[in-house]
Image (cartoon, rainbow, N blue to C red):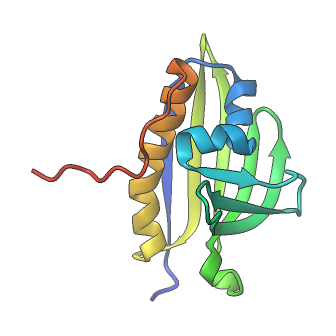
Amino acid sequence: MSNEKTRFVYVTYIRSTPEKVFEALTKPEIARRYWGHENVSDWKPGSTWEHVRANEQRTVQVVGKVVEVAPPTRLVITWANASQAADPASYSRVSFDVAAYEEMVRLTVTHDELEAGSGMAKGIQQGWPIVLSSLKSLLETGQGMDVFAKPHVA
């Protein structure tokens, strides 16, 4: 693999409040409803966080550290597959920027410091759009989507 880095940016508008969007990102019981995972941490800068599959095995799939927390407008975390947690080069960074926008919230997710062409870079390009669409659906309708659904190929 190369040392070239890439990033992925996704912007969505949600009919909600910044406080509710921020809670959905940081409260395990809410994340489970739109992501099928729980984001577990005390959400203090320097603390660890874990992305835990909300199933019987409670598998930790992604790990990282909390870099910055400014409720309800900004959350920054590092991100690595749990299997690669010991390798500092495997970590990327995710920034959640939450801004009030008229009667809505503009949520900008920037996943950067990704190794270009890596499996992680490819995976998040498919993953973030459905996860954030499910978050939007949950906050606007009370029901998330099946984020594990496979795309239909024509």
| Above or below, 85 relative to 39 | below
| Above or below, 140 relative to 33 | above
- The image shows residue 26 at horizontal and vertical percentages of 74, 43
- The image shows residue 117 at horizontal and vertical percentages of 39, 76
- The image shows residue 37 at horizontal and vertical percentages of 60, 52
Q: Identify the residue at the far left of this view.
A: 154
Work out whether residue 11 can be spotted: no
Residue at 42% from the left image edge and 64% from the top image edge? 123
Left or right of 149? Residue 89 is: right
Left or right of 14? Residue 99 is: right
- The image shows residue 109 at horizontal and vertical percentages of 58, 46
Which quadrant of the structure image shows residue 41? bottom right
Work out whether residue 19 can be spotted: yes
Residue at 58% from the left image edge and 62% from the top image edge? 112
| Above or below, 128 relative to 117 | above
The residue lying toward the viewer, choosing from 52 and 79, is 52
Residue at 68% from the left image edge and 87% from the top image edge? 87
The residue lying toward the viewer, choosing from 52 and 104, is 52
Left or right of 147? Residue 70 is: right
| Above or below, 140 relative to 150 | above
Q: Quadrant of the N terminus?
A: bottom left
